Amino acid sequence: MKRKNKHGEAGAVEPGTEIKTAKPKKKRKKAPIIIAVVIVLFVIVRVVACSSGGSAGAVVTTANAVRGDLQESISTNGTVKSEEVSVIFAPVSGILESVNVAAGDAVEAGELLATYDMAQMENSMRQSELQYEKSNANYSSAMSDNARNQAKLNEATVNLDVLNRQIEDTKAYLRDLQNELSDSQRHTSNALAEERMNLTNSMRENTSELESLSVQQKALQAELEAREAELKALMEQPPAASQEEAGGTGNGSDTAGAPDGITAEPDAAGTPGGGSDGAATAPAAADTTQLEAQIAELRNQIAELQNKIAEKEKEASNINNALSNNEYVSATANNSDYVADLQRKITDAQELLQHYESYKAEMEGQKSSTENTVFDSYDRASYNADKELAGITYQESEEDFEQAKSGICAAYAGIITECTAVSGSGVSNGAHLMTLESSENVKVTFSASKYDLEKLEIGQKVDVTISGTVYEGEISKINRMAEINTSNTPMVGVEVHLLAPDDRIILGMDAKLTVYTKKAENTLMIPVEAINADKEGDFLYVVENGIVVKKPIVCGISTDTYAEVLEGITEEDVIIVTSYSNLEEGMPVTVIPAQ
């Protein structure tokens, strides 16, 4: 099967000649000329064949493989771009006093592109400075207040711990004093009550005894008075009296006038109360003595009773005094030095407890009021952050002021390709102002298909034609990602670095490129149209003794016209380049050498 080269037609080449090719161009309309030549050749061959009187076979043109240098290349179009593109943003916030460039202007490295309104920048810096000073003052004040509040909180916390212990101790001490006073009062009251009961019982017994003694005294006094009366009566009787007057006759006795318990003394004859011979006689001395003895005894008894009564009355007086003293002690028991001392201690303890509790309430209020005002770690971090933020803002404003004084300058020589900055307008930090593209570092970009991509490598040389001037370049980058073009074909971006650009290059212009890919020196070459292919690979038809022979080959690099043959043929082989009929191995052919 004959394979036509898609890049061009075959042609003869001298041995040792270097073959270069560019991207395939549109073919000129050569068909009428070729057809005419083929017809003429065919007529000549047929005439010769007829005149010889034999069968000539298929007519073919042939050529021999030649040696030479073969340079593979790709021709394409690209766009001139800058390799170094800087989008210039506002370095600081402020007002642009002037903008010195416009889009399309060429600038030199270090050229002043725009300036800031420095009066406004100075005011902004002063505001930041004042804010920083205010933040420092607020921080110092807050830290000072916090230190005071922390001290108060610490004081309240410590004091409350101490006060709680003191209050508990004082309450315990007060309870002990009150218990001691209560015990003392109870013991005193019990003792006085017991004494009063004993004294009352003693008084009752004494009174009973006095009453008994009084009764006895009255009885003895009455008996004494009776004996005294009897004695008086005896003493007052006449000395001579009749027996009748004496109150008896015969041996009778007169006992009518004798006091109770007093018995008259018997006379000498044994008859009591009677005289001799019954005659009345003077009171006997014995009777008088006996009465007097009785009276004396009674008086002694009365005296003894009076003494006992006096003792009992004295005892009663003593008991009354003791009862009075008991009542006095009961009434004044709470006013004793011991009780008074206890009561004073209790009063002092109560006052101290009240003082502690009042101070505790004060400390609790102090703790409650300072607990919510003392900084926690978050509050302290917030104040520190505010202070640090104000410091950073002030420092940035100083840096912005210094940076603004220098204005906005070009970092390198190039072209302003975009400018949105306007004089007098306010800009914020990072606002887009303009775009600067280097005119010293230039590249050309183009898109490569998957067929060309496999031939491209970083560092390959490229001829770049821009506005009629050819510049040297080399491939500097091959993208690792394909993009779909308008024909829905994936294409890979390639960049070519220009080695020596000049100021005649205009960014954005079209450029023609010739990329030199692989090169083979002194290699065996054949016309590309002679190559055929089947399922087993590339092959050639050669002529041996007027017969077609099929030879498999291994191809190397190729151009639009020639292909490198690595294996399969030699320079002596006659290669069929074109045929005017279908060829088959073994068929005879008529050879027309290629011109």
Image (tube, rainbow, N blue to C red):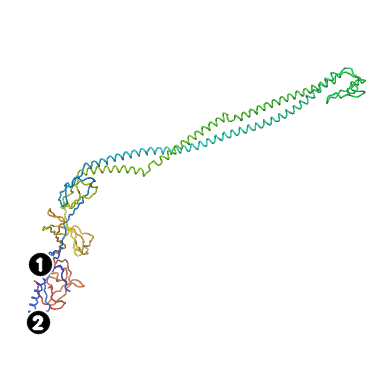
In this image, 243 relative to 342: left or right? right
State left or right for residue 87 relative to residue 379. left
Of the numbered discs 2 and 1, the one sitting upstream in the chain is 1
Q: In the rendered image, which quarter is residue 514 located in?
A: bottom left
Percent x, y for residue 58?
12, 77
The amino acid marked with disc number 1 is Pro
| Quadrant where the image shows the N terminus | bottom left
**Numbered disc 2: secondary structure:** loop
The amino acid type of the residue labelled 2 equals Gly
Return the residue at label 2: 54
Residue 508, image x and y in percent?
16, 56
The image quadrant of residue 216 is: top right
Q: Is residue 381 above or below residue 259?
A: below
Which residue is nearer to you in this view: 241 or 169?
A: 241
Across and down, in percent, residue 88 comes to 21, 50
> What is the x, y in percent for residue 158?
44, 38
Residue at 91% in and 24% down: 252
Where residue 15 is drawn, which disc sits there?
A: 1
- Contact check, label 2 and label 1, Cβ < 8 Å: no
SS category of the residue bearing label 1: loop
Q: Is residue 18 above or below residue 443?
A: below
Q: Which mark is residue 294?
A: none
